[in-house]
Structures are given as C-alpha cells and as structure tokens.
Amino acid sequence: MSRRNHFHDEMRWRAVGMLQAGARQSAVARELNVHRSVIHRLWIHYQRDQNASRRRGSRRRRITTTADDRYLSECARRRRTLTERQLASQLSTAVGRPIFRQTLSRRLHEGGLLTRRPVVCVPLSPAHVKARLHWAINISVRLQSSRAMHSLRKSLDLTYRTIPEGQ
C-alpha cells in the first residue's frame, strides 16, 4: 500500500526559488525527487496567489474579501430598506465583479445581519378594503362599549366598594 506524503512548505519555497532563478520545471522536479506535474501545479499556484504554502481545506475560494464583507455590512446597516438584490448590485458595482444574492445573504448572516425580503402582496379589491374597514370599526366600537359597560358595572356593584364598619 502506497503512502502519500505532502510536499512540505520548505521544499515548496525551495522549488519556487529555483524556478524564479530560471531553472526548468523538469530539472527542479528531478532535483527534489517529485513528479513534474507537482512542480507545475506549484508554479501555477504561486503565480496566481503569490504564495507557495499548502492550501488549507478543500472548499471553494471566497468571492468576497474581508474588506468587501465590512463594506457590505456597513451598507446594510446604513440603508436598512435595501433588498438583497439591491445590495448585491451595489456591491458588484463597487467591487467590479458579480456577487450573487445568496453569497451576500450568507455574508450578512455571518455578521449577524439579515437582509430585507420584499413581500409580494396581492392588492385588495375595493370591496375587500371596505369590508376590512367595516370590520375594524365594529371591533373598536365593541371594545369601547365593553370597557364602558365594565367600568359602569364596577361603579354600581357594591362588592367593589368598601363600606366602613359600623355605618
């Protein structure tokens, strides 16, 4: 059974130094006793990220930087009425690359914020508006009359009154 060994950071930086000095990838691979594809991937990784250290974790790279996340949370706090789509388009124009609505929602959630979701409502017909208004008026009248009746009963009821002894 074969055992997989990782190319340690010291060896990675040594390989990058040799490549920067002008050595060919095949020569560097022979020198370090690894396959040429390992050196090729290392060189591509170094050119892209300016870092030769081993990548931790296997998840996808983050689209937003920490500065983008701070800017996003600041915008969301300042303008509470913006929807997810509006915040995403604002951040996309500021950053210069597309940011998806779901990514934005996750970033705000990490910061303890929630985005406003627009509620889609079916507009009421005039008959429904009239019926709702009539219902609200009836309820308020009933509540006022029941409170008035309760206070009247309370004032007339002798059990609520305190009569001094001996009178």
Image: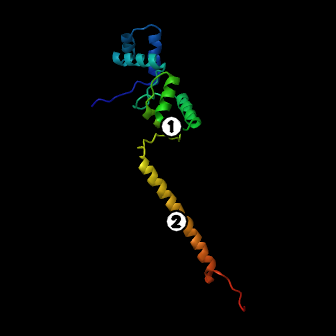
Which of disc 2 and disc 1 is earlier in sequence?
Answer: 1
Q: Is residue 156 left or right of residue 49?
A: right
C-alpha gap between disc 1 and disc 2: 46 Å
Q: Residue at 48% x, 56% y: name it.
A: 134
Residue receiving disc 1: 108
Q: Residue at 56% x, 30% y: name it.
A: 71
Q: Nearer the viewer, residue 95 or 64?
A: 95
Is residue 51 placed above or below 56 in the rendered structure? above
- In the rendered image, the quadrant that contains the N terminus is top left
Is residue 147 placed above or below 43 in the rendered structure? below
Q: Secondary structure at mark 1?
A: helix
Residue 113 picture location, percent across and down: 52, 40
Is residue 127 placed above or below 156 in the rendered structure? above
Q: What amino acid is labelled 1 in the image?
A: Leu
Residue 42 bears which disc, if any?
A: none
Q: What amino acid is labelled 2 in the image?
A: Arg
- Mark 2 neighbour density, 10 Å: few (under 14) some (14–19) many (20 or more): few
Residue 30 picture quarter: top left
